[in-house]
Image (cartoon, helix red, strand yellow):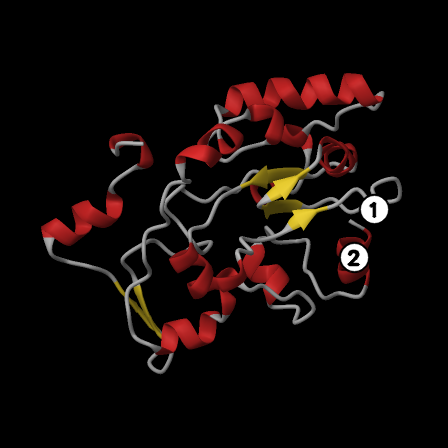
Amino acid sequence: MLYLQKMIDTNRIDVSKPVDLVAILNTGLYKLAPDQQQFGVNLTDDGADIFNAKICIEVQWASELVIAAIERAGGVITTAYYDPHSLQAMLNTKKFFERGVPIPRRMIPPPDAIEYYSDPSKRGYLADPEKVSEERLVLAQKYGYNLPKIEDDPDYEMLTERKDPRQIFYGLNPGWLVNLRDKVILKPQEEELVKYYAQKVGSLRV
């Protein structure tokens, strides 16, 4: 967390927008090697006691103390899984878009990770939002701080922005093709492709 605070303080990360793995990789200060079984960002407890940035952040793993530090500062944290193909697209977004291929669907977590990412206490992206809200209050009571009311925050829309479990990039849906040269986004028109890319996690076998 200390490293994250430094990136925020030095304007490497813009907290006026939701922060995810892409934003962290774009700082040039964080390296990821999916071929070495690295699957994203693991926020550690170091610096949790001095963390003071209001942030909407999505990481792959976070401890209870880290979650408490972010929520105490008025922020929101989500833990989310990305499969290897999704990670490759996120590593270098410019290079990926230049390939001229559609954005893939993010795959569901493997069986041994489903429980973690469905757990509201872990702020899993597959967890019931109402149960996540309950767990936010439980954690605030445990660590003795007043939980800021997100609904009263002027940054409410930013703080509550979420990706669909199938999305890789904020604002871009699976199946879309980003043409950087012409600065246009091409969307699938064939009915079968539209259905394929729109398929929800809940409609698939786990």
- In the image, taking residue 124 as reference, residue 76 lies left or right, namely right
Give residue 24's position: percent from left, percent from top.
Answer: 63, 60
Q: Measured from the top left, where is residue 71 in percent x and y?
A: 73, 34
Residue at image point 38% right, 72% down: 97
The reply to whether residue 156 is in sight is no
- Front residue (pair 5, 162): 5
Give the class, few, some or many, for how many residues have Cα within 10 Å of label 1's Cα (few <14, many ≥20). Answer: few
Q: Earlier in the sequence, mark 2 or mark 1?
A: 2
Spot the residue most to the right. 50
Q: Is residue 95 above or below residue 90?
A: below
Residue 187 locus on image (x, y percent): 24, 61
Residue at left offset 66%, top offset 68%: 27
Q: Is residue 103 at all visible to an observer of this figure?
A: yes
Q: Find numbered disc 1 in the image and state the secondary structure of the residue it sits on.
A: loop
Q: Residue at x 68, y 59 (%)?
A: 14
From this view, report whether residue 42 is shown above or below residue 112: below
Find out whether the residues at labels 2 and 1 contact each other: C-beta distance under 8 Å. yes
Q: What residue type is labelled 2?
A: Tyr
Dot label at residue 3: 2
Type of residue at label 1? Asp
Say which mark, if any, is on residue 46: 1
Circle 2: element type: helix
Q: Residue furthest left?
A: 191
Farthest bottom residue in view: 181
Measure the alpha-carbon separation of dots 2 and 1. Answer: 9 Å
From the viewer's perspective, is residue 142 above or below residue 205?
A: above
